Amino acid sequence: MNVPQTISVKIEQKFCGPPNSGNGGYVCGLIAEQIPEVASVTLRKPIPLEVDLTLEVGAHLVTLRNENELIAEGKTASLEMEVPSPPSYSSALEHRENYPDFRPEYFQTCFVCGPQRKVADGLRIFTAPKEGSDLVAAPWETFPGLFDARGKLGYPYYHAALDCPGAFALSKLTDKPMLLGRMTAKVVEEIWAGEQLIVIGWPLAKDGRKVYSGTAIFRADGQLKAFAKSVWIEI
């Protein structure tokens, strides 16, 4: 009988989404790192910051708990979806200039998309619409603190980058603020320091309060690095 592995984790304040809870994509990445290949992670509760949490890694399920309260859980999944082609890197730079000026106050400091985050403090992925398309796109200008000593991107940052662009892609389906409910993601190829990157998002469907989007990360030459399907919950 396999005994689940228990890991103590703490989500630092800098990895917030709303000011008082963790960024959903980043936390999905922490859990997905323990799951081979494609992982589907469901967020059950707001993610507490600066608190000792328990990551329990079992043979078929990975859970994140705050004492006895289930915060999130992940499991192996499959993911088949058509990923649109990205715009050129220069076009993505132009799209960023159209990043929406208004963001709800509770996302101003988001680790991924918060405009109040400084360079090398947040991911600063500012996706904006591509003219004549349902796509949103942005360049992702990484910084050294995201990479290990070999120059390889830390695993949770793939999922973080795949998070907020999906919400921005849903403006035609809903005008309500949303929180990430579930992310199913696949890392296709590792990202290394110095690569120019583009992140895109696109809408999929709406079902009541649930809204679905796709996101992907590409190298500037069009090489697909990672992609995800996410479920958002209107609040």
Image (cartoon, rainbow, N blue to C red):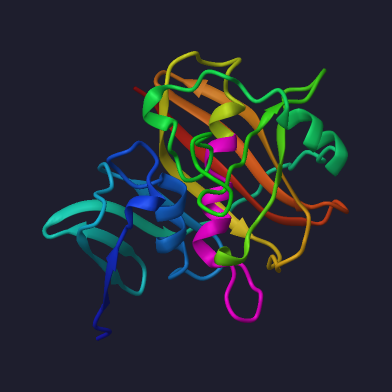
Residue 97 coordinates in the image, percent (x, y): 73, 27
Please name whichever residue, 209 or 53, is drawn nearer the observer in this view of the structure.
53
Residue range (magenta): 147-165
Pick the residue in front: 196 or 221: 196
Q: In the picture, which quadrant includes the C terminus?
A: top left
Looking at the image, residue 87 sits to the left or right of residue 17; the answer is right
Residue 152, magenta (yes or no): yes
In the displayed structure image, the side of residue 140 where residue 114 appears, left or right: left
169 versus 193 height, above or below? above
Query: Residue 6 sits in which quadrant?
Result: bottom left
Residue 93: percent from left, percent from top: 79, 36
Residue at the image point whose x is 88% and y is 54% from the top: 221
Count of numbered circles on the image: 0
The magenta stretch spans residue 205: no
Across and down, in percent, residue 39 comes to: 49, 59
Q: Quarter holding the N terminus?
A: bottom left
Given the current orientation, which residue lies at the most extreme bottom position?
1
* Nearest the eye: 120 or 63: 120
* Relative to 190, residue 166 above or below: above
Instruction: Identify the residue shown where x is 59% and y is 36%.
Output: 165
Q: Where is residue 223 in the image (x, y as percent from the top left)?
A: 82, 56
Query: Is 118 positioned to the left or the right of 4 in the image?
Result: right
Q: Residue at left 85%, top 34%?
A: 91
11 in relation to 149, above or below: above
Q: Residue at x 52, y 18 (%)?
A: 102
- Find the residue positioned furthest to the front: 118
Q: Which of 171 and 38 is in front in this view?
A: 171
